[in-house]
Amino acid sequence: NAGVTQTPKFQVLKTGQSMTLQCAQDMNHEYMSWYRQDPGMGLRLIHYSVGAGITDQGEVPNGYNVSRSTTEDFPLRLLSAAPSQTSVYFCASRRAQGARWTDTQYFGPGTRLTVL
Amino acid sequence: DAKTTQPPSMDCAEGRAANLPCNHSTISGNEYVYWYRQIHSQGPQYIIHGLKNNETNEMASLIITEDRKSSTLILPHATLRDTAVYYCIVRVAAGGTSYGKLTFGQGTILTVHP
């Protein structure tokens, strides 16, 4: 299994541009989520999904959209990039339920985004 | 989710045991203690979790005090590759009303030196 993959690894945008960060997992996990990590801060939840067609907001959803048309993919869209969105973005997935040892979140390698 | 308190940094000599403490004095009865780590420039990685009994896996051991107000993550033979930020997180287990959001605090920066 490839686990959780994210593309691109690096991206530079100009203020006002839009783009989509891609996230895919091949573990058939029901739950997927997006976090951002800023210097000196922990990860903050942006959006999450508990299954195909179901999404919800996390702590810092403003400026981002998500959709979940398949179990495997969970793209994050920046509608109009702002310098405040400069960050490292991590996608994560996990099983919805199961034995306690499956309650593990798997993270992708991250996308480093700079907005000028 | 209960708040956790960790020391900001710790050092450990290579080959020795690294003992990382975590205080979670407001933990509820249905909340588990989770440990993740983040090696520089990588995504967080799950290490271990437990409810009240001590737990061990191929990566580490987790010791939880009897009153569950604190715990210790033990890396038995630390290597240079264990240098990372270690996060102690308390939350309900999968299947609860919580989606399973992980609330990452500042964590402990563990530096393993030769």
Image (tube, rainbow, N blue to C red):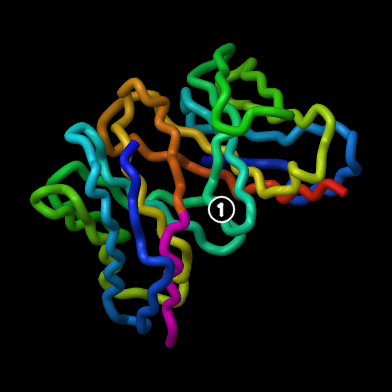
User: The numbered mark 1 sits on a residue in which chain?
Assistant: A
- Residue at the spot x=38%, y=74% of the render? B10
Residue type at the position of mark 1: Met
> Percent from the top left, x then y, of residue B31?
25, 36
Q: Quadrant of the N terminus of chain B?
A: top left
Q: Nearer the viewer, residue A116 or A96?
A: A116
Instruction: Looking at this view, name the residue that lies furthest to the bottom.
Output: B114
Q: Is residue A90 magenta?
A: no
> Percent from the top left, x then y, of residue A51?
51, 17
User: Residue beneath label 1, please?
Assistant: A41
Residue bounds of the magenta highlight:
B106-114
How many marks the image carries: the answer is 1
Q: Classify residue B60 by image quadrant.
A: bottom left
> Percent from the top left, x then y, of residue A8?
75, 44
Q: Nearer the viewer, residue A106 or B54?
A: B54
Q: Is residue B110 magenta?
A: yes
In this picture, residue A51 sits left or right of residue B31: right
Q: Classify residue A73 by image quadrant.
A: top right
- Residue at the spot x=69%, y=28% of the render? A62
In this picture, residue B30 sits left or right of residue B101: left
Judged by its main secondary structure, the magenta piece is: strand
- Residue at the spot x=60%, y=43% of the render? A90
Q: Nearer the viewer, residue B31 or B59?
A: B31
In this picture, residue B2 sits left or right of residue A106: left
Q: Residues within 10 Å of mark 1 (few under 14, many from 20)?
A: few
Asked if residue A99 is positioned above or below residue A86 in the image, the reply reads above
Q: Quadrant of the C terminus of chain B?
A: bottom left
Asked if residue A22 is positioned above or below residue A42 in the image, the reply reads above
Asked if residue B110 is positioned above or below residue A78 in the image, the reply reads below
> Percent from the top left, x then y, of residue A102?
33, 35
In this picture, residue B12 sits left or right of residue A114: left
